[in-house]
């Protein structure tokens, strides 16, 4: 089968597919658009106690997942798909990552527990270190589900309206405009007039202005990046034109 394949290396394989077995992702799973396999890292342990962790060199609290065991677990599934280690020390996960992964054959996700994973195996295997946000979870499993949910909804045939992914938050580097539905008057709160006008150009302009305003107010970082790309795009044709003109 050629769909998007997710393999999860975890100490808690029974946590999967979890929420990914429901709703949009769950239906896509049933239809074979993607598949998921959770493998127990403990199956790669070799000693009689099946131990996967040990105390940290240099001291300190907690336990660290052993590089030899994790390496053997990765070796059992590695096949050229991107290998991602979920860790708060990683690069922040973004919509562009979800898009990139969704365009490929799938991903192999390595979930830490306790204090994390021995850094040497992450480097030796060339794993991409990704964080889902600036907070600490007790394990990588929820982070893996977040990453997969963001990827799966972008797979062809998963979302109902083909266009819906192009309009939503982050797709143009902006947060999305607000949504409203019936009733038009709810507890004295009315829907913005323009949305009832039937004037599609005016609606598009209003939505655009709302998206810009909300991004500027809530996410100065996204707004700055958006302005940067808009400027680059605007200047490119001028640059080409001047080159042509001067030759
Ligand atoms: N001692 C580590 C935290 C370990 S939390 C530190 O301070 O960096 C245990 C595991 O949970 C991690 O190995 C990782 O796989 C997962 N995890 C916790 N927070 C995460 C986050 N924000 N993003 C991705 N994975 C996370």
Image (spheres, grey):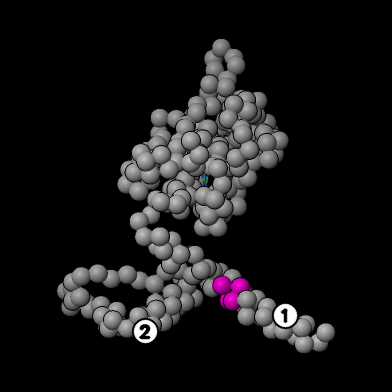
Q: State the image quarter where residue 105 is shown.
A: top right
The answer to whether residue 165 shows anywhere in this view is: yes
- Residues 53 and 129: in front is 129
- Residue 93 vs 61, above or below: the answer is below
Which residue corresponds to the image point at 56% horizontal and 72% vertical from the top-left?
226
- Residues 219 and 127: in front is 127
Q: Quadrant of the C terminus?
A: bottom right
The circle on residue 202 is 2
Q: Residue furthest bottom?
A: 245
Left or right, 80 with reference to 37 = right
State the SS at label 2: helix
State the SS at label 1: helix
Q: How many marks are shown on the rendered structure? A: 2
The circle on residue 26 is none
Which residue corresponds to the image point at 54% horizontal and 50% vertical from the top-left?
103
Q: Residue 171: image x %, image y %?
A: 49, 65
Left or right, 165 with reference to 47 = left
Q: Residue 46: image x %, image y %?
A: 60, 16
- Tell whether label 1 touches label 2 (CB within 8 Å): no
Which residue corresponds to the image point at 51% horizontal and 57% vertical from the top-left?
95
* C-alpha separation, residue under disc 2 versus residue under disc 1: 33 Å
Query: Which one is in front in this view, the residue at disc 2 or the one at disc 1?
Result: 1
What residue span does the magenta drawing correspond to?
226-230
Q: Residue 128: image x %, image y %?
A: 63, 45
Q: Residue 106: image x %, image y %?
A: 53, 42
Residue position for label 1: 240
In reply to whether residue 158 is colored magenta, the answer given is no
- Residues 170 and 46: in front is 170
């Amino acid at each position: 089968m050629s769909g998007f394949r997710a393999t999860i290396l975890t100490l808690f394989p029974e946590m999967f597919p979890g929420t990914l077995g429901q709703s949009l992702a769950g239906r896509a799973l049933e239809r074979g658009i993607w598949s998921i396999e959770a493998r127990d890292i403990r199956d790669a342990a070799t000693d009689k106690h099946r131990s996967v962790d040990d105390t940290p060199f240099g001291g300190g609290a907690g336990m660290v997942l052993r590089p030899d065991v994790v390496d053997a677990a990765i070796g059992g599934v590695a096949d050229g798909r991107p290998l991602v280690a979920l860790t708060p020390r990683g690069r922040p996960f973004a919509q562009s990552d979800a898009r990139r992964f969704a365009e490929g054959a799938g991903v192999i996700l390595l979930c830490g527990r306790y204090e994390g994973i021995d850094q040497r195996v992450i480097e030796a295997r060339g794993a991409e270190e990704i964080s889902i946000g600036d907070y600490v979870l007790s394990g990588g499993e929820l982070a893996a589900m977040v990453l997969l949910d963001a990827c799966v909804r972008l797979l062809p045939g998963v979302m109902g309206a083909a266009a819906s992914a192009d309009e939503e938050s982050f797709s143009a580097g902006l947060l999305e405009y607000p949504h409203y539905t019936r009733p038009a008057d709810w507890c004295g709160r009315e829907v913005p007039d323009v949305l009832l006008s039937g004037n599609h150009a005016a609606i598009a302009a209003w939505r655009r202005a709302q998206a810009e305003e909300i991004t500027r107010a809530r996410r100065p970082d996204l707004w700055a990046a958006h302005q940067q790309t808009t400027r680059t795009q605007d200047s490119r044709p001028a640059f080409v034109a001047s080159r042509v003109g001067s030759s």
